[in-house]
Amino acid sequence: MTVAAVSITILTHLGLITGQTAGLAVLISYATGASFGLVFFLLNIPFYWFGYRRLGLAFTLKTALSVALVSLLSALVPDWLSFATLNPVFGAILAGLLSGSALLAIFRHGASLGGIGILGLYL
């Protein structure tokens, strides 16, 4: 979860976005000033029902915990990590590598970070 939160920190530091519910949460947080973590957590709530119905209780609980941890850590990581300079191209590539690695680990442990990832795993 920490790796995913670091990825979000890099993207938001650079003013970039990602896809899926995380990207939507970044856009909403940019537009409203609300915290990414809160918006990300709230956006994922409707997807838990689908995950529960199609992938089971264990998957849904792991996913809810994963989303909650990324939501919490995304608020904490910027206090632990800062960038004096960060090239946008390198930052975007690094964030992609980090988020891909985080998602791979989460998927392999029978969970997701919510949203479209739940549908993708189901399909």
Image (cartoon, grey):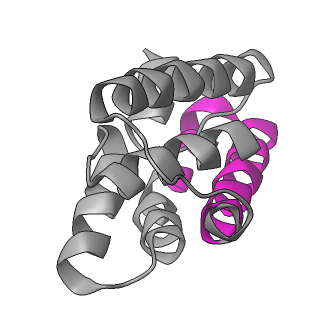
User: Residue 119: x and y, percent?
Assistant: 42, 29
Residue numbers of the magenta segment: 48-75
Tell me: residue 5, above or below residue 58.
Answer: below
Q: Foreground residue, 112 or 7?
A: 7
108 on left or right of 50? right
Tell me: residue 86, above or below residue 78.
Answer: above
Counting every numbered tag in the picture gives 0
Tell me: residue 69, above or below residue 38.
Answer: above
Tell me: residue 9, above or below residue 42.
Answer: above
Q: Foreground residue, 18 or 92?
A: 92
Q: Residue drawn at (41%, 32%), measured in percent from left and top?
A: 91
Any part of residue 103 in sight: yes
Residue pushed farthest front? 84
Q: Residue drawn at (37%, 84%), measured in percent from left and top?
A: 34
Q: Residue drawn at (35%, 30%), measured in percent from left and top?
A: 92
User: Residue 18: x and y, percent?
Assistant: 31, 40
Q: Is residue 61 magenta?
A: yes
Is the stretch drawn in magenta largely helix, strand or loop? helix
50 on left or right of 90? right
Any part of residue 50 in sight: no
33 on left or right of 22? left
Residue pushed farthest left? 31
User: Residue 46: x and y, percent?
Assistant: 43, 61
68 on left or right of 91? right
User: Residue 107: x and y, percent?
Assistant: 67, 21
Q: Foreground residue, 59 or 117?
A: 117
Give the quadrant of the C terminus: top left
Q: Is residue 100 magenta?
A: no
Q: Residue drawn at (74%, 45%), measured in percent from left and top?
A: 2
Give the quadrant of residue 39. Answer: bottom left
Give the quadrant of the N terminus: top right
